[in-house]
Image (spheres, rainbow, N blue to C red):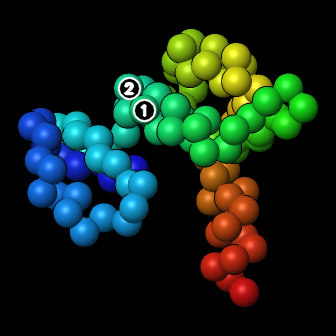
């Protein structure tokens, strides 16, 4: 997902994007509840969670991730377990930061 800081859709911005990419437009360029819902719906399509195959999604405590009942209900209905990092600990707990980037 590419998030562009503009109001109006501009398909030219996605001309050389990788296959399967999609664009979301928001004036600030920051993720919010609505844009995160767009992302999680695509995540559901690609991860294909189910009763016998639940998916763990690790998120930080950003408002766009935690202050949406619609998000929680969507995750629950699709067998996605949301695990939220405690506040101000993301830099200590992010698996990629700890495991990959510091090898």
* Residue found farthest to the right: 52
Q: Using a 10 Å C-alpha cutoff, classify the residue at mark 2 as few (fewer than 14 neighbours), some (14 to 19) or many (20 or more).
A: some
Q: Nearer the viewer, residue 27 or 73?
A: 73
**Residue at horizontal 30 percent and vertical 64 percent from the top:** 17
**Which residue is most to the bottom?**
103
Residue at position x 72%, y 62% in the image: 95
- Residue 92, quarter of picture: bottom right
Of circles 2 and 1, which is in front?
1
From the viewer's perspective, is residue 93 above or below residue 37? below
- What residue is rendered at 54% in x and 14% in y? 70
Q: Is residue 80 above or below residue 3?
A: above
Q: How many marks?
A: 2
Quarter of the C terminus within the rendering: bottom right
Q: Position of residue 25 (x, y in %)?
A: 23, 40
Q: Position of residue 34 (x, y in %)?
A: 38, 26
Q: Secondary structure at mark 1?
A: helix
Element marked by disc 2: helix
At x 42% / y 26%, what residue is drawn?
33
The reply to whether dot 2 and dot 1 touch (C-beta < 8 Å) is yes
Which circle marks residue 34 in the picture? 2
25 horizontally vs 66: left or right: left
Front residue (pair 24, 103): 24
Residue 6 appears at what percent x and percent y?
13, 43
CA separation, marks 2 and 1? Answer: 6 Å
Apparent side of residue 91 relative to residue 16 in the rendered image (left or right): right
27 to the left or right of 103: left
Residue beneath disc 1:
38
Between 22 and 7, the one nearer to me in the picture? 22
x and y percent of residue 62 in the render?
A: 51, 36
Q: Nearer the viewer, residue 90 or 58?
A: 58
């Amino acid at each position: 997902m590419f998030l562009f800081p503009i109001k109006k859709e501009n398909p030219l911005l996605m001309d050389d994007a990788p296959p399967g990419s999609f664009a979301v437009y928001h004036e600030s360029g920051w993720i919010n509840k609505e844009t995160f819902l767009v992302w999680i719906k695509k995540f559901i399509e690609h991860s294909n969670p189910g009763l016998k195959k639940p998916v763990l999604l690790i998120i930080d405590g950003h408002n766009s991730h935690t202050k949406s009942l619609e998000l929680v209900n969507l995750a629950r209905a699709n067998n996605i377990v949301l695990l939220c990092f405690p506040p101000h600990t993301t830099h200590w707990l992010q698996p990629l930061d700890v495991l990959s980037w510091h090898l």
